[in-house]
Amino acid sequence: MAEGKLSVKLEIKDQKLKSQLETALQKVGGFNIQGLTSKERSELLIFELGDNVEKEILLIQDMLTSGEVGEVFFASSHSDQAVLRQAIRIGAREFFSTPVEDQEIKLALEGFKGRKEKEAHRETFKDGKIINIMGSKGGVGTTTIAVNLAVSLVEKKSVQSVALIDMNLLFGDIPLFLEIEPKYNWSEITKNISRLDDTFLKNILSVDSSGVCVLPSPSYLSNQNMATPAIMERLLIVMRRMFDFIIIDSGQSLGDISLKILEMSDTVLLISALSLPCLSNTNKLLKTFSDFGVPKKENIKIIINRYLKKSEISVKDAEISLEKKIFWTIPNDYQTTVTAINRGKALAQFAPREEITKNFQQLASELCPESEKQEKKGWGIFGKR
């Protein structure tokens, strides 16, 4: 391997794609393309799947297990979920659906380089934690929970900074919940990905009166402002350097971007309710997560929202149905919650003494124990003053 360069091997049959990858590797820099007959370990293998997908994926899995290759990117004209699921299950970091755009390849290679640099130069501080909030079905309250958890976390003395990202791809409501009028949303990142760093992000985030930094979703979607898994990975890597906690309101979406977020999340809060439809969907999602191999089982925590003690279905019933412990219950206080939403305020600002507000504060403490929190050095962009 060339000194100081990362070794990469291209197993690509499509000559146009191969030329595209070679050009991207040259432009990004820092790579040494190995010959197909090379016996040296490859830090990265980019492999184009053919007709015998199952056999090829098993072959690559053996290479990853033996350490013959470090990471693998797949390219394929097969974009169905079954192929994607198989690729993710064996640990593929990227999946290019051909034809692929140059920018997507560039971002994936830069992400790979970033990971290798981080391995080589271990940072002395702990990265911020990503808490991903997903709903078992529509209307279970993911946005309410995301907003109030973010505000409860930022109020803790040990927490210096919290970001809140709205990944509801259609009609995200976080600005309404906090009564802010953001000038920018995450489509600015997709249009200016080459500029993405701490300073750029600081300029496009909106800051709520509580101190939570908000990155809303676009008011409409177009081909020009669509995120990709590679863009999302780069965004979250930057945000981890800047914030103690990144809260993501993922709604109910489950696609390529959601899978990337699930892969990078430290904790996934799966929101459900004590009703048969919600618990049925929760079960389906848990099985889907298991099929995809992300997130890790221990990272998934189930929260029952709008909990009533005299519910026909008990927490114990739910745990038996899901074969998993319920992590937290949030009491049903419809009137207080809706009034706070209508006034554009978090519960901590609108009703600080109510039971539901204290419940969110206790949840924040559970997710961020004071004894485990370490002060980060060198932060000041969004830190408390």
Image: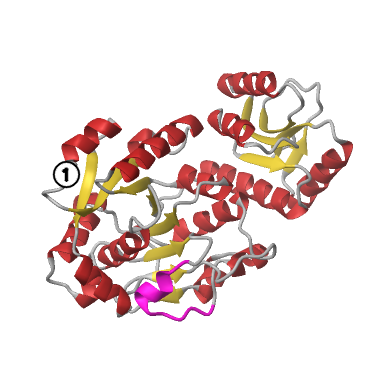
Q: Quadrant of the C terminus?
A: bottom left
Mark 1 neighbour density, 10 Å: few (under 14) some (14–19) many (20 or more): few
Q: Secondary structure at mark 1?
A: loop
Measuring 40% from the left and 58% from the top, which residue is drawn there? 246
**Foreground residue, 185 or 279?**
279
Q: Is residue 192 visible?
A: no
Task: Examine the image and state in which quarter residue 282 appears.
Answer: top left
The residue most toward the right is: 15
Q: Is residue 176 magenta?
A: yes
Name the residue type under label 1: Glu
Measuring 15% from the left and 52% from the top, which residue is drawn there? 308
Task: Examine the image and state in which quarter residue 72 appears.
Answer: top right
- Image coords of residue 35 (percent x, y): 81, 28
**Foreground residue, 355 or 4?**
355
Relative to residue 31, is residue 245 drawn left or right?
Answer: left
Measuring 41% from the left and 69% from the top, which residue is drawn there? 174
- Image coords of residue 307 (percent x, y): 19, 52
**Foreground residue, 191 or 226?**
226
Relative to residue 290, is residue 331 drawn left or right?
Answer: left
In the image, residue 125 above or below residue 361: above
- Image coords of residue 90 (percent x, y): 56, 28
Q: Quadrant of the N terminus?
A: top right
- Image coords of residue 48 (percent x, y): 75, 32
Relative to residue 88, is residue 356 drawn left or right?
Answer: left
Relative to residue 175, is residue 105 drawn left or right?
Answer: right
List the residue tagged with mark 1. Answer: 312
Q: Which residues are magenta?
A: 172-183
- Number of marks drawn: 1
Q: Is residue 179 magenta?
A: yes
Q: Is residue 252 visible?
A: yes
Measuring 66% from the left and 21% from the top, which residue is drawn there? 54
